[in-house]
Image (cartoon, rainbow, N blue to C red):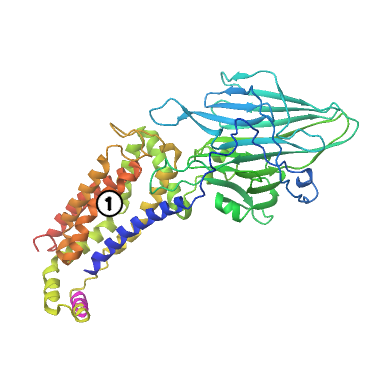
Amino acid sequence: MESIRFPLIAALAVVCFFLYQAWQQDQAPAPEPASLSPIDQVDVDDDVPTLAASPTRSEEPTLAPDADTPAVVEPSTQQVVVETDVMRAFIDPQGGNLVRVELLDYPVEADSDVPLAVLHQGSRGFFVVQTGLLGADAPTHKAAYTAQRTRYRLSGDQALEVPLTWTGADGRQVTKRYRFEPGRYVIGLDYQVRNASQQPWSVSAYGQVWRTPADAGGGTPFVRQFEGAAWYEQKDGEAKYRFQKADFGKIEDEPLDVTQTGGWAGMMEHYFIAAVIPPAEQSVRLVTKPSSSRGYLTQLIGEKTEIEPAGAATLSQQIYVGPKLQNRLEDVAPGLQLSVDYGLLTPLSEPLFWAMDKVHKVVGNWGLAIILITLAIKLVFYKLSEAQYRSMAKMRKFAPRIQSIKDRYGDDRQKMQSAMMDLYKKEGFNPFAGCWPMLVQFPVFIALYWVLLESVELRQAPFFLWIQDLSAPDPYFVLPVLFGISMYFQQKLSGQAMTMDPMQQKIMSAMPIALAAFFTFFPSGLVLYWFVSNLVGIAQQWYIYRKLEHEGLGRKS
């Protein structure tokens, strides 16, 4: 009986784990109400960081208080549209900001031709990247720029540059130049600054990612999808950095304001991220905070650059807007690949994804890759499974004697437990021997769960027939039903019910139905893994039991 408790506890732990994920999702802040001012009618800008807030090359910054009231500026009616082979970007000349980025290879739905907009602005919410210069009379993200053209299209393998020009009253001039490259989600941004005035001009570049929470609903039940700020933070002035993230509630409670060298900062959601990346060697001020008007901000403010009269300078930064592709992010900026956050089980999840990615490159189908990785995992844990099934076989062999002890002592549980322990000692049998293999394998299952949940590579990845999106639940519930059937046959083959009391038998009989119903809400890729794992387990169990029959521990003993 004791050996049956662990599988029940393990199953309960799985259920509790996913319920906890759902509870965390429910605790996320509610989105802004739709009654707020539509962003497509007014400018979505917060208080501009002051010049005193930007670090110089030789001194720590003096932090200036934020303005309480943001200025409201009418947006430009004619946006600049830039199309590459992977994205369509919309730049508003009023501020020269990225106000919309559509990812051409990532449709909103699997059967849709409408590309997903990571950056966007509308009446219910917004997600934008604002950039500008700080300094006396410098063009911030509110300044009016002039565009040479309103439409650009990248062709061939050459980079595409999009210049926007601002000219001050005293002849100072700034060319804000975006750079797009084929096949990349990185957008270069240079400020070519010319000081035609008679006075020195001190300026610094900044970038901020500003957004409101997305609308609630539409996600997969029991699957928590993170939404909030992310950044790469230097550890106390050391050469070491660490990935950090904070949901909107934590930003409210614990705003951040630090000075460091390099790093990056932005906002991310389930599969996608928008981040501002300064030069790695530059001293920057990194800020995360609630906006003084609405939404939440991450800001990176660069070093001051002094430009003499008739002089010129170029200030640079990068912007990443795109999917969290694990094989590409590290080449964009150090630590950006950590935005694919597997949590505490990262040491297990990363090699699992690496192996699955290698298999996918060979077979060309993520569903087949999941199946083959499942076979490999079951093969690696075969010896542990054999120990587990041997323990089950021994329990079945001693089932009549255990039942006799139960009948003899009835409700006297102390004497019954003592008699069972004497039986285990006499026969050299440990009823918990079958529990440890399950305990060892459980972290691997959770690690693979995070791989299947976090990997954008599996988003809308088709398998076969009716499964056209391994990251979404099975639309016809076929896989959950097959999983329940396989679990039922696995229970029958193990013969666990022989050692249970009537109440435990009822619970175990209901488990396949309960978990099958539970799994109708889960990504089909995860259910596919568990179903294949059950099938392989049944095959291993049958083979091991046949082997044990020759050792006197089989079903006929």
Camera-nearest residue between 473 and 319: 473
441 in relation to 278, above or below: below
Q: Residues within 10 Å of mark 1 (few under 14, many from 20)?
A: some
Reading the image, the residue beneath label 1 is: 515
* Element type at mark 1: helix
Whether residue 418 is in magenta: the answer is: yes
Q: Residue furthest left?
A: 556
In screen coordinates, is 134 left or right of 213? right
User: In the image, residue 41 lies at what x, y percent?
Assistant: 62, 30
What's drawn in magenta, residue-wise? 417-425
Left or right of 47 on screen, residue 109: left
Where, quadrant-wise, is the N terminus in this rendering? Answer: bottom left
Overall secondary structure of the magenta section: helix
Q: What residue is rendered at 38% in x and 56% in y?
A: 17
Whole-percent x, y for residue 495 in the image: 16, 59
Residue situated in front as seen by the camera: 274 or 183? 274
* Relative height, residue 539 to residue 331 (above, below): below
Q: Quadrant of residue 492?
A: bottom left
The quarter of the displayed image where residue 472 is located = top left
Please state the horizontal and vertical placement of residue 306, each as a whole percent of the image: 83, 38
**Left or right placement of residue 201 versus residue 21 in this view:** right
Residue at 21% x, 55% y: name it: 510
Amino acid type for the residue under numbered disc 1: Leu
> In the shown orientation, is residue 137 left or right of residue 88?
right
Tell me if residue 264 can be seen: no
Does the segment drawn in magenta span residue 427? no
